[in-house]
Image (cartoon, rainbow, N blue to C red):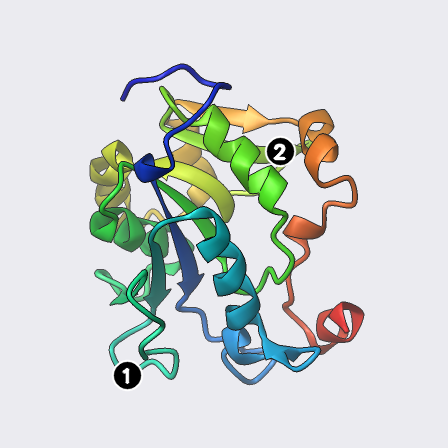
Amino acid sequence: MSGKPGGDYDKRDFSAAILAGGIGKRLGTNKALLEIEGRTMLDRIMEKMLEVFPYVLLVVKDEDSPLSGDYGPRVEVVADLLPGKGPLGGIYTALEHSPAPYVFVMACDMPYPNLELVRRLLSEAPGREAVIPRRGPYIEPLFAVYHRDTRPRIKKRLEADDLKIHDFIDEIDARFLEEEDICGCDPDFRSFFNINTPEDLKKAH
């Protein structure tokens, strides 16, 4: 890894990955296909990611996923390499498939990504293994940047069924973007609003 954190960045060093391998049990459907104002969450997120990144990965559960399809030349659909390993497995799959050294990872149930905040995370990434937003004691590991060099450590954890993202983050060189910096880009923290229940979906509408 090279570069100076907090400065300019080369967008060619970054891909984006949308993690869409979850089941969405409480909503009874794949969350990426839920509609807000007539558009699926996946469509909303994909459009935003393509504004910033030259290449986007859509990580799905398996090849039979209802999300499999043709999203254009800048999007690749990839199935989990180690199925059933949760979000950490999705991050690993994204890093393995990425053509760029860094990957911005976000969940498919976060319909309002703030692109100014995304770009701020990218600018902090050079020279780090990860950049992760933090609000007080809470971190946002599914709206964060990871370097491909972390793959061996993730794989070791996956193979041992040690799937806690927080434990993985504790062992890498992570830069935390603190609340005051987040507020400068996304004062209402809309980027981190995620939809897990019917009540969350009503709130989004």
Q: Nearer the viewer, residue 10 or 188?
A: 10
Q: Could you say where residue 148 lies in the image, as x and y percent from the top left?
A: 26, 37
* Residue 24 shows in this picture: no
Q: Position of residue 78 (x, y in %)?
A: 26, 65
User: Residue 36's x, y, as percent?
Assistant: 67, 76
The residue identified by callout 2 is 134
* Quadrant assignment, res 10: top left
Quarter of the image with the C terminus in it: bottom right
Q: Which mark is residue 64?
A: 1
Which residue is at 73% across, 31% downward? 184
Q: CB under 8 Å between callouts 1 and 2?
A: no
Q: Residues within 10 Å of mark 2 (few under 14, many from 20)?
A: some
Cα gap from disc 1 to disc 2, whole angstroms: 35 Å
Left or right of residue 116, residue 84 in this image:
left
Question: Residue, x 55% and y 26% (percent of image)?
Answer: 176
Residue located 31% across and 77% down the image: 70
In this rendering, position of residue 81 left or right of residue 199? left
Instruction: Report the amino acid beneath label 1.
Output: Asp
In depth, the one of 109 and 85 nearer the eye is 109
Indicate the secondary structure of the residue bearing disc 2.
strand
Residue at x-position 61% and y-position 52%: 113
Please state which amino acid type lies under the numbered disc 2: Arg
Pointer 1: residues within 10 angstroms few (<14), some, or many (20+)?
few
User: Does 199 appear above or below 136?
Assistant: below
